[in-house]
């Protein structure tokens, strides 16, 4: 699964791209401690590099903490890279199609100001909760949906079991 990301600037001679903030591990020569003899002065390969044109991020899965009940949620890690590269602290970031408000969530974490726009109330509720901007919306309490494995854990925590002790008596145990 892939999604194209367009990088557009208003002024090609004046734009923000913080390469140093998004360096990734260079898996080639540096790892094998190779020397680059193509350089005027032979030096070890860099251990970090600017990400190339193809970025790989795990999609948001059901069991991940960041998961929201939403069809096209973008991973936090992806937005982190985009915002670190293309904005500075105190800048204003706008996402006009916010969905789960991942962009705004990351902007807040990174000390950017943000504007998020979303058409559907269901998703506005997610945004308000994720950004800790409100505890309720139109009279409804905003709570993260409990996932099936969380219900199972809760149920297990409240299950009482009977064990036979060494003295032949039965003991109640909660696990
Ligand atoms: C692809 S999703 C965005 C996903 C988001 N990046 C995330 O991480 O969750 C696009 C969102 O834009 C919203 N949308 C579509 N048209 C809109 C409009 N005219 N104004 C505001 N929001 C709109 C949809 O409701 C949908 O939630």
Image (cartoon, grey):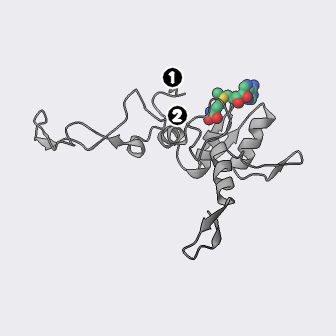
**Where does the image place residue 109, in percent across and percent down from the top left?**
58, 51
Q: Which quarter of the rendering shows the C terminus?
A: bottom right
In screen coordinates, is 63 left or right of 135? left
Quarter of the image where one finds residue 174: bottom right
Q: Earlier in the sequence, mark 2 or mark 1?
A: 1
Determine which residue is flagged by label 2: 59
Residue 111 visible? The answer is no
Dot 2, how many residues are within 10 Å of its Cα: few (below 14), some (14-19), or many (20+)?
Answer: some
Kindly identify which numbered label has been placed on residue 116: none
Residue at left offset 41%, top offset 42%: 22
Question: SS at mark 1?
Answer: loop
Q: Secondary structure at mark 2?
A: loop
Q: How many marks?
A: 2
Q: Residues within 10 Å of mark 1 (few under 14, many from 20)?
A: few
Left-right relation of 152 to 87? right
Q: Does mark 1 have its CB less than 8 Å from ligand 1?
A: no
Q: Which residue is disc 1 drawn over? A: 4
In-front residue for pair 57/52: 57
């Amino acid at each position: 699964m892939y999604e194209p990301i367009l990088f557009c600037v208003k002024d090609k001679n004046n734009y923000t791209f913080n390469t140093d903030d998004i360096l990734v591990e260079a898996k080639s020569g540096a790892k094998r401690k190779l020397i680059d003899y193509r350089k005027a002065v032979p030096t070890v390969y860099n251990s970090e590099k600017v990400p190339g044109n193809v970025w790989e991020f795990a999609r948001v899965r059901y069991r991940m903490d960041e998961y929201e009940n939403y069809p096209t949620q973008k991973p936090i890690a992806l937005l982190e890279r985009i915002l670190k590269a293309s904005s500075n602290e105190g800048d204003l970031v706008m996402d006009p199609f916010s969905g789960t408000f991942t962009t705004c969530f990351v902007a807040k974490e990174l000390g950017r100001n943000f504007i998020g726009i979303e058409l559907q109330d269901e998703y506005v509720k997610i945004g308000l909760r994720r950004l800790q901007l409100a505890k309720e919306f139109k009279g409804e309490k905003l709570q993260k949906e409990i996932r099936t494995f969380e219900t199972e854990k809760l149920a297990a925590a409240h299950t009482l079991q009977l064990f036979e002790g060494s003295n032949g008596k039965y003991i109640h145990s909660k696990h």
